[in-house]
Amino acid sequence: MINYKTTFPFLLLLTVWLASCEKKYLEIVPVLQVEQDLSIPGANDVKYFSFPSEQIGYAAENASFIYKTSDGGKSWLKLAVGNASNPCRGMEFFDTLNGMCLMGENVYVTDNGGLSWTYRGSGQFMGISTTGKGIMGFSTRTSCSILVSTNKGKSFQLAGNIKLDREFEGAIIAGTKVFVLENDQAFRSLSGFDVETRNQEELVVFGRMNNPAAMFYNEYSKALVGSSGQILQPPSPDESYQDAYFGHTYTYFSVDGYQDLLIAVGERTASINRQYGEESKWSELLDRDGRSFPFTFFKIKFINENTFYLSGNNGLLWRAKI
Amino acid sequence: MKQTLLTCLIFIIVNFYSEAQHKNKKEWQVDKFGFIASGSYGILPIQLSGLTDVGSKVSTMVGSQWVTERPEYAIKDTSALMMNGMVHLGINIPFYRTATWSFGAKVNAGIGFQRSRKAAEGLNGFVLDFPQFLYFRNYKNKLDYTILLGYKYTYAPLSYQLALGGIDFNLKHNKAIRLYGGLNEYKYYRYFTDGRTEPAFRLREFGLAYVASF
């Protein structure tokens, strides 16, 4: 004979367990995890950084000097860049010793880890391509000249010119390409130049973006970010750039990615594009408490599939992961 | 297959046995194999949480699109109330009967509509409901009642399953009023990429039903 006094409570527990044991997920929330805080005490807006190795890194703000760490960010030294008095407007390192700095409109190079700097010429932009070529450029009224270095900045040769229709505003270096920004309120295209193939290209944009700030592309994805909080992407590799995310009006300053993962950062925002199964979508990257960031981020750079460096205001410099 | 046949055999034997046992009981009080139909109204308190702008919430028109100007995002909880109305058809299957009580199962399937207020408008829609009960019916006294314990699966815009408890107050002429409620809270979770999980959607259900047996 069944003992109902014990069977009923048992069945009750069993059904409650059955009904609640399976976990179903409604959403995946990307949160940023700071692996290492490398922030620079006393620094302001860290707009540029370069970590050629885990121990040796360089960072710069809008000042006439740069910072260097040789102990993985535990301590930072201030290094003067030649006799430059203009603020830093760009800084990249090829390796632990060889690097370039744009101070005002003067390009300096170093081959000894920033101990001494050599003036290389005047330029309005500089950078390093993903293939390791040094790039610097300057504009006249009618064209923008692009110079390329294949020996880590020791010498630069003219690689090509991009014709300008309007006043030169700046340039974006992405991958192996340089895209020139012209003063154009109703901007609809970017003129580009590939330092590897030496080909020019016209990048057509169907989105609304007045001031593009950064671009990233690889074989998996492409993104163009800028002011007014828009992220543009081509729906498929051969199509034009179009609005892909417009979640707010904060300005983006940088975008980087690894394979199909993209992160764009800017004023009080870090936005992530991640592939979830078939679907890829942009969302805000949150802190551990599930809140958006109160900081301004200036630059992001991936070092592997999930780890990246991130800089921001008040000397912020993190090695972080998702 | 063997198990199903065995279960059917036991069920038939038990039914014949219990039927023979209680010839003197008032007909409506004798728990019988039969069909049941019910209409129910359920109230579902829900807790939702999601990424919300907790800043100034000012939007601006850019092109043809409204965009939040300077949001401050945070995950915030919201409460909402959802209601459903359903009709069920089922079978009452007594397993064992004595002079004063019986024990069995009620197998049901139903269809209905679910509606919610503003906070969860996306959850409005048709539902398919499958509540299954084991029951203990006591008809020893004038108060003829049935205690229900069961499990239900509801196919809805956000499907859920609940352990159910309930009580039927059996009225004359094979009618009953049922009060039921979920014994657990059904949860959908949010997965954070740092490995944590937390509930993103929580639901309970309580309801009232009018049940008729044939």
Image: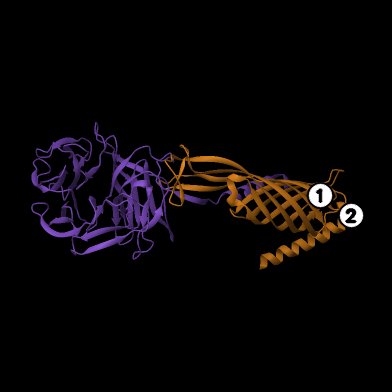
Q: Nearer the viewer, residue A298 or A131?
A: A298
Please indicate whether residue A277 sits to the left or right of residue B31 in the image. Answer: left
**For numbered disc 2, what is the local secondary structure?**
helix
Please indicate whether residue B7 sits to the left or right of residue A300 in the image. Answer: right
**Quick one: quadrant of the N terminus of chain B?**
bottom right
Extreme residue toward the right, this view = B24
Q: Nearer the viewer, residue A322 or B4?
A: A322
Q: Indicate which label's residue lies in the foreground, 2 or 1.
A: 1
Label 2: chain letter: B
Please indicate whether residue B82 sits to the left or right of residue B95 in the image. Answer: left
Residue corresponding to mark 1: B176
Circle 1 residues within 10 Å: few <14, some 14–19, many ≥20: many
Reply above or below: B147 against A67: below
Q: Nearer the viewer, residue A18 or A83?
A: A83
For chain B, the rendered hue is orange
Disc 2 marks which amino acid?
Glu
Q: Quadrant of residue B36?
A: bottom right
